[in-house]
Amino acid sequence: MKHSWRADLIAGAVVAVLLIPQSLAYAMLAGLPPQVGLYASLLPLLAYAALGSSPVLGLGPVAVLALMIAQALSGLPAGVTPEAGALVLAAEIGALMALAALLRLDALSSLLSVPALRGFENGATLMIAASQLPVLLGSAAAGFTLPDLARTAMTGGWGLSSTVWGAVALALLLMSRRMGLPLLARLAPLLLLLGAMALSAFTPAAQGVAQVGALPTLALPLGLPSLDRALWLQLLPSAALVALMAFVSSFAVSESLAQRRGEKLLPAAELRGLAAANLVAAVSGGMPVAGSFSRSILLHEAGSRTRWTLVFVAAFMALAMLLLAGPLAHLPKPVLAATIVVAVLGGFTLRHYAEAWRYARAEGLLMAAVSTTVLLWSAGAALALGVVGSIALLIQRTAQPHVARLGRVPGTQHYRNVERYAVECQPEVVGLRIDESLVFTNARGLVDAVLARVQEHRERVGAPARVLLLMAPVNHIDVSGLTALQELRAALAAEGLRLELSEVKGPVLDRLRAVGWLEAQDVSLYLSHHEGMQAGEHALRPSLADMDAPGQL
Amino acid sequence: MKHSWRADLIAGAVVAVLLIPQSLAYAMLAGLPPQVGLYASLLPLLAYAALGSSPVLGLGPVAVLALMIAQALSGLPAGVTPEAGALVLAAEIGALMALAALLRLDALSSLLSVPALRGFENGATLMIAASQLPVLLGSAAAGFTLPDLARTAMTGGWGLSSTVWGAVALALLLMSRRMGLPLLARLAPLLLLLGAMALSAFTPAAQGVAQVGALPTLALPLGLPSLDRALWLQLLPSAALVALMAFVSSFAVSESLAQRRGEKLLPAAELRGLAAANLVAAVSGGMPVAGSFSRSILLHEAGSRTRWTLVFVAAFMALAMLLLAGPLAHLPKPVLAATIVVAVLGGFTLRHYAEAWRYARAEGLLMAAVSTTVLLWSAGAALALGVVGSIALLIQRTAQPHVARLGRVPGTQHYRNVERYAVECQPEVVGLRIDESLVFTNARGLVDAVLARVQEHRERVGAPARVLLLMAPVNHIDVSGLTALQELRAALAAEGLRLELSEVKGPVLDRLRAVGWLEAQDVSLYLSHHEGMQAGEHALRPSLADMDAPGQL
């Protein structure tokens, strides 16, 4: 116990060192004053420690969310400050997450497919880096989409000293990563911050460079966020998307770490912890929070054992705020921008696009489209495109099932596609496999697809008397599918063919039996496809003579 | 050829007899003056005859669409007449259908599942009948939703003579159906119309009863519809829903008749024909048109052979318009309302709800919800609910796959669920079947689901060395599913278990091979599940001793 306490204290210190510069930087990225990032790194951590479940979730401001927040706050009505908007956003995110936890809606997060998530993260990474370019260059350009940046870049100037500050900071950060000393790489952002503050405060080196500026007295601004109904309604759609992203990204990292650590994680507990953290952020002056990928990995590597670690992080943050309040005013903004750029660009990977494209063109395209939408339009639209696009691909797949004519692999009881394997066919039975559940999206095409295969069988193998559908790939039949199956039976009967089914799965069979479908439609059923094919060889061969007569055999 | 010409002429006459009263009635139902229904039954028929493909599609005004049109036109801005709105709607519907034909989007119509379609038609039928009640009763109440009707019923009075006209008309129409004389039943609406006009014109019987009123000179009002941008934008969403419904209902009836007639129907040609018909309606003063179920059946039964039939229908309609223009003014509206009620109520079936409910609760509920939405809110909202609800049910199903532990049916090469069949298990291999494609909606739960079954096997059968997944039900693996499969392999390896696959389908295997997945992940593959289970018995039994050692066997 004592050992764990000490391990958690050390891990807390390690993460606080990274969290101090990130809090300031991500607040700036979100278009908020720096203290809003610092406040988000205090009490919300205690709330998650009390109600969450992961001992290694690096809670606090997150770069991707900061970008989404910036876009959400860009259309605030006159008279509403970005801070006030951020608090309302945090309150809504917390409330939505609490509601989702209550209604057990955590499964909704599975609507974000891997390509959508990766496409979003890559696009957001590029957009974050791009948005910091003007700060690095001392330009007045600003914006959270490429078109906005391009528009403002026309008018924005260029500052030599800002560029020097930015370039040196970037170079130092990159060098610290290349040195092969993990400790140095971790300390570098904080050391850079302290060095830059000192240089800027005691020399004229930062003249003409944008600086963070004096902070208000660092007293936690406890109180309810604005309760303006119009403002809440305006921010609600953004809040829903940020909440989805916050939960999915937090849960993805804490779950993968839990698997590595042999721990069990409950989605509901994670939702509860994140909900509490955001609600607390809303009443203590903080921007919306989630679990950061980089800080979570760091917590794991630094040996965090319990959620007490987050309590220690919060304590270190409070201490840092007291010490830094004064000097922070002199921190040149290009240094913060350099911190952001280096922090996010490590997460960008082109490889994912190539992998997705090689495996499935459509998913690769969706991934690229989501990234592009982040850059050109907005993160919210990109996330929505990712969800809708993934669903559309799913529907399109079920709508165009692969239909295979089957033959027997010689010497086995196993049946495979005649076009892929050297298999044996029987003239009197058409063995077919429809590689999809029979649902409304493909119901309309079922009869045509089967009749086409029957015709093929008639031309290549001989005149059949029965059609035996192998139902192993049919995981479900909905009402539309059942209607189509009924039409198929009638269409086959009109050609003098009998419809039979094999290997119907338990859950599917239960439903068919519940309405007495097999009896009503007089459709035979076989436990295995082999059995069904054999039944034909023996039982039905005598009746092959009347094969061409209409009606059922 | 001559024979066909005569058959088509007779079929045309039979259908015109039904179309005359329906054109007038459905125009009234849509809140439009009667001539808009008549114009819709002239030139649009020629357009479909030229470009469509079914010889038995009963094109013209349709009751369900009339209801949708009425709702779409209920919010027109001041200064825009319903006629002008109807022409814009027809133009938009035609344009959308032409676009869908061009982009080969006819598959979009499969998004309307059978329960959604039936729920919609039932709800619309009830709503149409309800909307005609005030006309039958001589009340001033009006509306196309139950709340609207209820609200206006408070203020509307009640007319004795209207009620008598309506009741007598209803009784005559119902009696004509009960007589068992198909010819009489078909002629009844027209005879009733003529009789009512005569009675009303030459006697004072219709005093105080609402009448159709004098028509403008019957000259086709050829010309472009209003090009007001705001009006087009306002009607566009309704137009999209009406177009969807028009295509789906027309195609459903023409396709089922084509199957019965042994004809082949092309969705693209149907779309083209419907598009042309609606565009022509828009420039010749007609309301939007589609294929009517009852008139299509009638065309088939009356022996229509080619699309020339529609040309004859149009000719008869023109003749009727010339003759009726004068007398029509005296037609009492309750008679038209009775025609509508009798025409639509035949299509109402409670049985569908019970059937859907017994087979699949969720689909039964969706069907009832769609019907209720038509009655309480709007047809457009109901159609949207049907599409979204069907998709949600599809997603929910893929998200919660049935996972079965398999054993061998004694004496066969066939493997089934241990919980449903008396089967034999081997301790060293866990045979599993996941009854769903591996896609993003279920990817997150895959590892947990498999590990739970492995634990079950360990407790009940013995300590395994391999997990053999039967992939016959896996019709597709998307990028998210592949990622999950990779995580599963790693999680099993961490427990000292090897992941193997059997009966992977051709299309799925092609993708895995394209990225070299099986080799990269060192996952073995078996043609049949039986073979995979046997391989274990022979090849892997010697290594059972090191089973508990981590890593792969």
Image (tube, coloured by chain):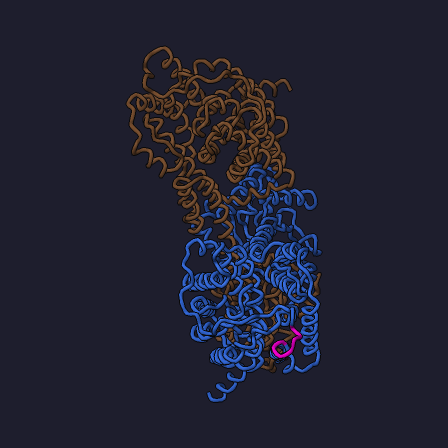
Chain colours: A blue, B brown
**Magenta residues (range):** A200-206
Q: Is residue A232 left or right of residue A376?
A: left
In this view of the protein, which residue sits in the foreground, B339 or A372? A372
Is residue A411 highlighted in magenta? no
Q: Looking at the picture, how far across and down is residue B25, in whole percent? A: 44, 25
Q: Residue at x 55, y 48 (%)?
A: A500
How many numbered marks appear? 0
When the figure is inspected, residue B201 is found, relative to residue B442, above or below; the finding is: above
| Quarter residue B474 falls in | bottom right
In this view of the protein, which residue sits in the foreground, A201 or B282? A201
In this view of the protein, which residue sits in the foreground, A427 or B24? B24
Q: Looking at the picture, how far across and down is residue A87, in whole percent? A: 46, 64
In this view of the protein, which residue sits in the foreground, A313 or A142? A142
Q: Is residue B512 left or right of residue A215?
A: right
Q: Tell me, yes or no, if residue B108 can be seen here.
A: yes
Q: Looking at the picture, how far across and down is residue A50, in whole percent? A: 43, 75
